[in-house]
Image (cartoon, coloured by chain):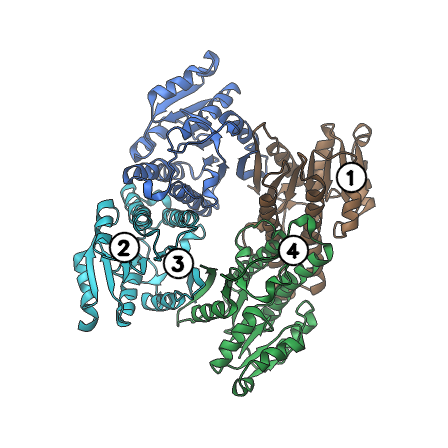
Chain colours: A blue, B cyan, C brown, D green
Amino acid sequence: MIVITGASSGLGAALTQQYAAEDHTLLITGRSEQKLADVMASLTPLEQVKVQTHAADLCVAEEVSDLFSRLSTPPSSVIHCAGSGYFGPIEQQTPQAINQLINNNLTSSILVLRELVSRYRDHKVTVIVVMSTAAQAGKANESTYCAVKWAVKGLVESLRLELKDSPMKLIAVYPGGMATDFWQTSGKDINTSSFMTATEAAAMLKQALIATEHGYVSDITINRG
Amino acid sequence: MIVITGASSGLGAALTQQYAAEDHTLLITGRSEQKLADVMASLTPLEQVKVQTHAADLCVAEEVSDLFSRLSTPPSSVIHCAGSGYFGPIEQQTPQAINQLINNNLTSSILVLRELVSRYRDHKVTVIVVMSTAAQAGKANESTYCAVKWAVKGLVESLRLELKDSPMKLIAVYPGGMATDFWQTSGKDINTSSFMTATEAAAMLKQALIATEHGYVSDITINRG
Amino acid sequence: MIVITGASSGLGAALTQQYAAEDHTLLITGRSEQKLADVMASLTPLEQVKVQTHAADLCVAEEVSDLFSRLSTPPSSVIHCAGSGYFGPIEQQTPQAINQLINNNLTSSILVLRELVSRYRDHKVTVIVVMSTAAQAGKANESTYCAVKWAVKGLVESLRLELKDSPMKLIAVYPGGMATDFWQTSGKDINTSSFMTATEAAAMLKQALIATEHGYVSDITINRG
Amino acid sequence: MIVITGASSGLGAALTQQYAAEDHTLLITGRSEQKLADVMASLTPLEQVKVQTHAADLCVAEEVSDLFSRLSTPPSSVIHCAGSGYFGPIEQQTPQAINQLINNNLTSSILVLRELVSRYRDHKVTVIVVMSTAAQAGKANESTYCAVKWAVKGLVESLRLELKDSPMKLIAVYPGGMATDFWQTSGKDINTSSFMTATEAAAMLKQALIATEHGYVSDITINRG
């Protein structure tokens, strides 16, 4: 069983389609029932049988807990794609949108990882945390977005130390800009025609995640170009 | 005029005392009127004349704005010390305390820097952002604290790029653990007898902040030992 | 055509075997003719037909140039695996072995990348630079090894900026400790039975290197566990 | 006693003048007897009495050892300023100049730190390693210079771990571009009129280096602006 958050669009939706096509059993989540149903509708009937949906607001601890309570056994992997963007010079950003950005990216990541460590730290669960290249360097006009992404990176690096002797593994993924709906709601007007698609990024990511007996790819940056 | 946030205890209080002793004009802020009054009471009458207090919750944009509205001219420096700690294994942390940690460290820093850039980006204002060595590396049992401190670092690095052609300068300060009240409320039981005091850290920081015509110390890490 | 340096042992040899098995045309290099012949002997006759060997000391600019002069057209990829280890407390390291470490890891990487940029900067050549997790953090008793690996990372990050508008791409690979001959000559007595093998690391790396039309994996860390 | 390397010009010479003016006892070194004599000549007779010179090539282990053999007791501080620059697109750099760059910056730093750890690891000696902001980020047309500076940073970070329980402290200093002779021999044609002078950088550095009983400034970045 693979759990995918942020599955209703972008990279999460593309990963859902690609893992479903390979006959994996999936639990996918997103904030909107409707969008999850749309992703479901994009699958073949045979694929749909193996995919469950569960809408949840990951900024609410109880909803995060309810999500994983649906599983009777530990998942093999959890791919945490949920997140949102918000851009522009800092003096043009509104307090309300900043709070939403923090909730959608940082609070949700803390609550998801807290739940996973709490439930599965003694199990062989692979947790893939999808961030952004904005977690690796400062960028003008992306200051608050960088802030929340750097935060998730600091969280992951710290939890790796807490999980040192645990079979649970954390994999950090840093994709560069993709051509997804993400940009429409981000406040950034940008031509994404040369950007990689979520489908391309999902394909590369899926390929890179294949582990061997004694090793695994722990950190991956995916760039356009 | 120097503005100091988080001035009611720890490094902020120590800086207040040392700058006041050197006859600087100060505006100090903290959440608690009472604690600010206590800091005030620790000053000599002559020093008190040059120090104003203004209680504010820096997680509320309007209160941040009101604070700086008190100034009739741009301050020479703003030293942003406000922040709080919260530690322990992630599975033992509560959602409520996590939200408070995010508010006290990240939301407040974003709102303060947003206000400062908005008001003073065309003025020669030096903004000193006090973080922690937890902003520079992951640490076990400090995962959420590292997260919010990494966030502030990402914010500062991004804003430096936005302020590239501005006379406003951002200085990043990373102190290691100090012997302050900070630990009492942090959930970490720790012997701080060999730690540097806030007074020591303030003295070193004040000394390091002295700039010359063509240069300044932009990043400082202060460690115990 | 894929060029592989450091192909006479470890990861380079394993990559040679795996790419040869997939019917790629290869030019492999290493310092020792004999060792290259041994790797050649490990291939099937059908594979051998597509593999050329060329012994070279990559610390000598002329030999680096001669190596690439053998190619009549730009290679599709160059995988730079050459390198050596040297460990222990700094006060126990000898100046001679330190110089050798610098030559084998830093000088050779500079000369190889210099040659590649010089020849192919206007071609779609993918250059994979294999470093080590020692390039990402300081490690006790690996100080000089970390130094040379950090150096290569700084080189790669700088050259990415020089190649910003070039079709040439630099991919950075950071493998953790593998169970290879590397350790026998490194001065570190270590039980490698739980380490990943070079074959495992090569398999993961090869898989991760697959690119799509608009994107590629630019940075990969491979860890044991 | 304070030992200063690279004292014959730039930051090292400026530090020599400023520490001498404060009546410190100094041992200063550089490659050229003549240049050391020139620095000496810039001091007052009273200052000269307290300053010794000793020419040495720090890329040669024996010369590094001879330098510190002159001291009958451990120095209080060693300020390692020695280094040289070399810039330009990588394909225009010569193998010979690259080797010199590696020697002057990396080999010398390894040999100096190796000697200091070997002699003084049980003494309260403060070792200040002056690098450059080029050690902190990649820069186009500074690829090999960044490489050797990143190397020294990796060395320092590793040695800090080796010296964890030692009274010896390593302080990392990262100055941005200064208006010194450095640029004349670096191959970079640049207008340095707005750069800070070595005298300014020395003044800021000296001020920042003042420690307290339980703490010290461990990392300092000095920028122009």
Residue B173 is labelled as 3
Cα gap from disc 1 to disc 2, whole angstroms: 62 Å
User: What is the number of the mark on residue B185?
Assistant: 2
The disc placed on residue C188 is: 4
Please indicate whether residue A72 sits to the left or right of residue B68 in the image: right
Q: Residues within 10 Å of mark 4 (few under 14, many from 20)?
A: some
First in residue order: circle 1 vs circle 4? 1
**On the rendered image, what quadrant is the C terminus of chain D found in?**
bottom left
Q: CA distance from mark 4 to mark 3?
A: 38 Å
Q: Chain of mark 2?
A: B
Q: Which residue is mark 1?
A: C39
Pointer 3 and pointer 1 on the same chain: no
Q: Nearer the viewer, mark 4 or mark 3?
A: 3
> Which quarter of the figure has residue B29?
bottom left
Q: Quadrant of residue A103?
A: top left
Of discs 3 and 1, which sits in the foreground?
3
Q: In the picture, residue A82 is in which quadrant?
A: top left
Secondary structure beneath dot 2 equals loop
Query: Do marks 4 and 3 both belong to one polypeptide chain?
Result: no
Q: CA distance from mark 3 to mark 2?
A: 22 Å
**Circle 1: element type:** helix
Identify the chain of the residue marked 1, using the numbered disc in the image: C
- Return the disc, 3 or 2, that comes first in the chain's sequence: 3
Q: Can residue C109 be seen in this snapshot?
A: no
Q: Write down the chain letter for disc 4.
A: C
Q: Are marks 1 and 2 in contact (CB under 8 Å)?
A: no
Q: The disc labelled 2 sits on which kind of residue? A: Thr
Query: In which chain is the residue bearing label 3?
Result: B
Q: Is residue D143 left or right of residue B50?
A: right
Q: Position of residue D62 (x, y in %)?
A: 69, 72
